[in-house]
Amino acid sequence: MKKSIIYIVEDDKFYKSLLIDCIEKNFGDFDLLTFNDGEECVDNLKFKPALILLDYNLPGMNGVEVLSKIKELSPDTKVIILTANREINIKVSAMTLKADGYIVKGVRNFPQIIEMVQSKIEETTP
């Protein structure tokens, strides 16, 4: 049986490495692909990821712009926006575009990331 795929779209190398460790330790039965920017992610939607952890502050397109493209090209893919920015308008924009989750970045928030990833994966599993 083919493994489901999780994408991590994050340009900060340190935070990306923390996310990779977190996902591999808790969701090792998934394939994991990482991208440094939104364009790369959108170009690789053909692999049909089950879930995308998407940074808001990316080079080129921001996370909300990338989210819009993802939902247009792969509407069933679950997307969780991650941001260090606490501005409410970003959350409103993300939720308006049907983000499946929104988490403010921080090491203390990794339990919340794990819980939300688990929840979204369960929604994609028949």
Image (tube, grey):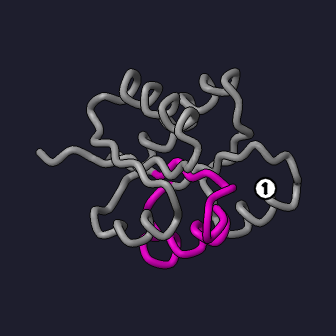
Magenta includes 38? Answer: no
Taking depth in this image into account, of 116 and 109 the one nearest to the observer is 109
Relative image position of residue 63 (x, y in whole percent): 64, 62
Relative image position of residue 49 (x, y in whole percent): 36, 56
42 above or below 49?
Answer: below
Side of 29 where 77 appears, left or right: right
Name the residue at 88% across, 54% down: 88
Relative image position of residue 4 (x, y in whole percent): 28, 47
Side of 100 where 27 appears, left or right: left
Please identify the quadrant where the N terminus is shown: top left
Relative image position of residue 45 (x, y in whole percent): 36, 67
Q: Which residue is mark 1?
A: 91
Please give the count of numbered marks on the rendered protein: 1
Region in magenta: 52-78
Q: Quadrant of residue 12?
A: top right
Residue sticking out furthest to the right: 88
Dot 1 amino acid type = Lys
